[in-house]
Amino acid sequence: MIGRSPRPPLRPSGGRPKTPPLWIGCSMLVLLAVPAILAPWITPYAPGQQNLSATLLPPSRGHWLGTDQLGRDLLTRILYAARTDLSVMVLAQIIPVCTGVFLGMVAGYFGRGIDAAVTLFTDTVIAFPFYLTVIIVAFLSGSGQRGIYVTFALVGWVVYARVVRGLSATFRQQDWIAAARTLGYPDLRILLRHLLPNVLPQAIVVLMTDMAALLVAIVTLGYLGIGIMPPTPDWGTMIADGRPFLSTKWWLSALPGLAVVYTGIALSLIGDGLADRIRRT
């Protein structure tokens, strides 16, 4: 009876590492995500509810963060925009992560011609400036959430493919891959059951860091008017709407901008904490 092929542990066992950035980042993200999810029960206003007799009000008891030029409650719109942007950020990563991880594993595992082809394709995409590529693809694919998903499905996989390809090429030289091949396991089984669990932790670290960049890209597209379209609340369109009032009602753009910075810091801390945890364990 043929036994199972030897599989190394993902990392040597050891004491449980302390990673304060991970818990700080998770706590920050929860503090934003929970109010965003509970927004319909937290605020008495609808995100598109207008009151033209109460426009551009400063923060007050009735409107904690004031109102915009159409009399809409700013806190309500920020919370609903968080629901929109965070959900789009997560959904837009599904196809790039799966594509990039798979192509990286295939290139690193098989090497030679397949590796050369994937590397050439990856380098070709990287050769174009990221934001220029995003703007062009988003413009051609159309505004709205569909355009964002198409855009990042086409260009967002590159970073995962590069990282996973390097890891897979390293693992390919190790004895446990050779043992699995000697036992006659098919390549697909080796990729999914043996190689994937060993490259996935690093891919998750990259995911957390890349989400911050993706969020900035989503907000940028909204600011330029080719991202999430009104009346759906979005931090990018809120920043753009408040631009004419920067000298008098600066908080209209500043507060959505601070929400973007806050979320980016939280995601970066999570990524740093995960990377530190992987290094220590």
Image (spheres, grey):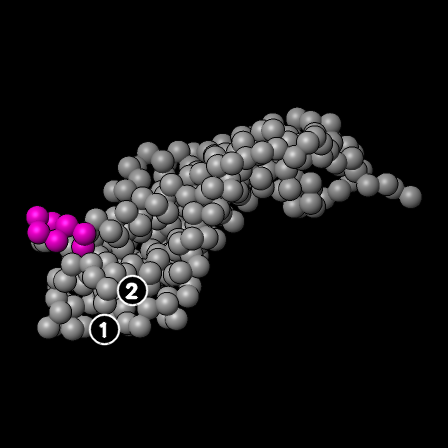
The verdict on residue 248 being magenta is yes
Q: Secondary structure at mark 2?
A: helix
Q: Residue furthest right?
A: 1
Task: Please provide percent x and percent y for residue 13.
Answer: 71, 32
The reply, left or right, for residue 228 in relation to residue 23 is left
The reply, left or right, for residue 152 in relation to residue 136 is right
Q: Quadrant of residue 105?
A: top right
* Residue on which disc 2 sits: 76
Evaluate if marks 2 and 1 touch, with contact meaning CB atoms under 8 Å apart: yes
Label the magenta part by its dominant secondary structure. Answer: loop
Task: Please provide percent x and percent y for residue 163.
Answer: 50, 34
Q: Quadrant of residue 173?
A: top right
Give the total number of marks visible in the rendering: 2
* Residue on which disc 1 sits: 49
Q: Nearer the viewer, residue 41 or 128?
A: 41
Q: Nearer the viewer, residue 149 or 84?
A: 84
Residue 24: give its label.
none
The stretch of residues the image draws in magenta is: 246-252
The verdict on residue 98 being magenta is no
Q: Nearer the viewer, residue 230 or 81?
A: 81
CA separation in Å, label 2 and label 1: 10 Å
Quadrant position of the N terminus in the picture: top right
Q: Residues within 10 Å of mark 1 (few under 14, many from 20)?
A: few
Task: Please provide percent x and percent y for residue 114.
Answer: 54, 36
Give amino acid for label 1.
Gln
Q: Quadrant of residue 87?
A: bottom left
Q: Which one is earlier in the sequence, the residue at label 2 or at label 1?
A: 1
Name the residue: 28% across, 72% down: 45
Q: Secondary structure at mark 1?
A: loop
Q: Residues within 10 Å of mark 2 (few under 14, many from 20)?
A: many
User: Can the viewer see residue 171?
Assistant: yes
